[in-house]
């Protein structure tokens, strides 16, 4: 089959099909096609490809919207529909967590042994990369807290494993609250306050995925979908 | 944010995103309405056959969870496609998912043909799908994005993390291969 030599016009054929050309450009391309048998054939082929494409199922917009996190003034996220768990949802769980005896023991150990006040939240809590394929319902519920004391380090790691209902551990399961405090007492209110302050930190990862195209020649990820 | 403002079809994606960032959750509805079908088509075109709405939903959840980081270098839709494609890659890395997926690899093309035979009434359409199925994974991905989704080389380059030039080369190699297949 012959190919059109007017590459810049031939390249616009898919855009013509999808109505992505402005009026002037569309007329220019259509005028060319009218006098170019190769482009007529290619346009016909492209339309056949589009027509043969498998039909996509209809989307339930309402259901999708209901699953989305809710915006807040601070750019923080409140998850009402059970989307990716936020710091706040973990905080909610933490209220339950701290009321459990075993976790209270862990927290007490942290208070006694640690020096300097610092609070770290495991990156997995905030990293969307770890949330792929997570169950969308009930991720903020913390039903099965466990605590693990790491000795002889002064740092206590309390792991919170939520019951996601699907049996599959979520990113929250990897959430580690590392506490190191010289305060004599860390009440639920203190913890709540500290976690609230943590939320004000810019803890979310930077833009993901990175939409900056890498240098020329980097085509490794292209064609990964098989 | 104007308290009396309403998200409307006239607002650009960026305006809606800003409104959402400002606390107007309604803006998300318009953004989802605007892009959900395109994401479904994108996934279908890429070979996904199961749980497409879940995939689209995951894409939006991921996008809105990191929307504060969206810089607007590319369009919102292109950004969504990029996220969705990564989710599809993750899906396919999962052995369980892989078993349920319709694979369009050359080695299993016959299976795809058989399935298509039942779905596609016209012989022409069947042959066209066969020709697309013979492309290399990279060619097929670029070709379907360009032809079936109407994405520009620039958008394809962003999604595939490659260059416009590379995308163009893959497209032209693909369409040449499709023509050769159909001319046989
Ligand atoms: Zn031509």
Image (tube, coloured by chain):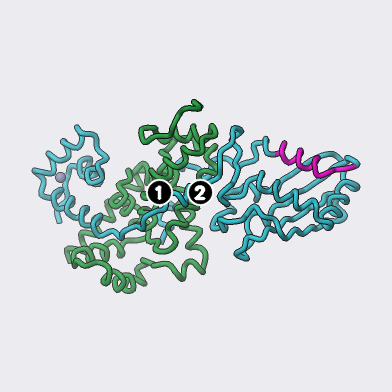
Chain colours: A cyan, B green
Given residues B2 and B67, the one toward you in this image is B2
Disc ID at residue A66? 2
Question: Can residue A181 be spotted in the picture?
Answer: yes
Given residues A33 and A94, the one toward you in this image is A94
Residues drawn in magenta: A185-198
Quick one: SS at disc 2?
A: helix
Is residue A108 toward the left or the right of residue A129 in the image?
Answer: right
Farthest residue, direction front: B4
Q: Dominant secondary structure of the magenta stretch?
A: helix
Quick one: SS at disc 1?
A: helix
Magenta stretch encompasses residue B175: no
Could you say where residue B106 lies in the image, as x and y percent from the top left?
A: 34, 68
Tag nearer the camera, 2 or 1: 2
Query: Which quadrant does the C terminus of chain A fall into?
Result: bottom left
Q: Residue at x 60, y 43 (%)?
A: A78
Judge: label 1 CB < 8 Å from ligand 1. Answer: no
Could you say where residue B160 lies in the image, as x and y percent from the top left?
A: 42, 49
Question: Can residue A215 be spotted in the picture?
Answer: no
Q: Number of labelled discs? A: 2
Where on the picture, by quarter, is residue B113? Answer: bottom left
Query: Which quadrant does the N terminus of chain A fall into?
Result: bottom left
Q: Residue at x 42, y 53 (%)?
A: A60
Q: Residue at x 11, y 45 (%)?
A: A36
Disc ID at residue B103? none
Is residue A32 toward the left or the right of residue A56 in the image?
Answer: left
Disc ID at residue B36? 1
Is residue A129 toward the left or the right of residue B121 in the image?
Answer: right
Check chain identity for marks 2 and 1: say if they share one: no
Q: Is residue A169 above or below residue B165?
A: below
């Amino acid at each position: 089959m012959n190919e059109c030599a007017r590459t810049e016009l031939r390249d616009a054929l898919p855009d013509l099909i999808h109505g992505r050309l402005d009026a002037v450009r569309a007329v220019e391309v259509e005028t060319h096609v009218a006098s170019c048998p190769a482009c007529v054939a290619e346009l016909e082929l492209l339309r056949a490809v589009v027509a043969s494409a498998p039909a996509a199922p209809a989307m339930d917009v309402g259901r999708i919207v209901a699953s989305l996190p809710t915006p807040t003034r601070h750019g923080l996220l409140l998850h009402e529909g059970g989307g990716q768990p936020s710091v706040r949802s973990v905080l909610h769980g933490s209220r339950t967590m701290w009321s459990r005896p075993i976790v209270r023991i862990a927290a007490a150990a942290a208070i006694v042994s640690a020096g300097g006040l610092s609070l770290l939240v495991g990156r997995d809590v905030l990293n969307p990369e770890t949330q792929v394929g997570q169950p969308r319902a009930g991720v903020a519920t913390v039903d099965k807290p466990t605590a693990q004391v790491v000795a002889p380090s002064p740092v206590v790691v309390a792991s919170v494993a939520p019951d996601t209902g699907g049996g599959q551990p979520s990113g929250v399961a990897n959430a580690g609250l590392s506490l190191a405090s010289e305060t004599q007492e860390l009440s639920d209110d203190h913890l709540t306050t500290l976690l609230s302050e943590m939320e004000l930190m810019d803890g979310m990862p930077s833009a993901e995925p990175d939409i900056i195209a890498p240098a020329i020649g980097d085509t490794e990820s292209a064609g990964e979908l098989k | 944010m104007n308290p009396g403002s309403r998200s409307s079809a006239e607002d650009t994606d960026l305006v809606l995103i800003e409104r959402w960032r400002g606390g107007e959750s309604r803006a998300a509805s318009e953004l989802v309405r605007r892009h959900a079908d395109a994401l479904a088509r994108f996934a279908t075109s890429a070979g996904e056959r199961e749980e497409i709405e879940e995939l689209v939903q995951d894409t939006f959840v991921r996008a809105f969870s990191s929307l504060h980081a969206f810089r607007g270098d590319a369009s919102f839709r292109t950004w969504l496609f990029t996220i969705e494609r990564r989710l599809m890659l993750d899906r396919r890395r999962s052995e369980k998912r892989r078993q349920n997926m319709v694979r369009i690899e050359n080695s299993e093309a016959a299976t795809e043909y058989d399935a298509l035979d039942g779905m596609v009434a016209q012989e022409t359409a069947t042959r066209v799908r066969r020709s697309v199925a013979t492309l290399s994974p990279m060619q097929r991905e670029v070709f379907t994005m360009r032809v079936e989704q109407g994405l520009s080389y620039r958008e394809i380059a962003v999604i595939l993390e490659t260059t416009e030039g590379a995308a163009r080369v893959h497209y032209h190699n693909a369409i040449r291969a499709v023509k050769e297949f159909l001319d046989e």
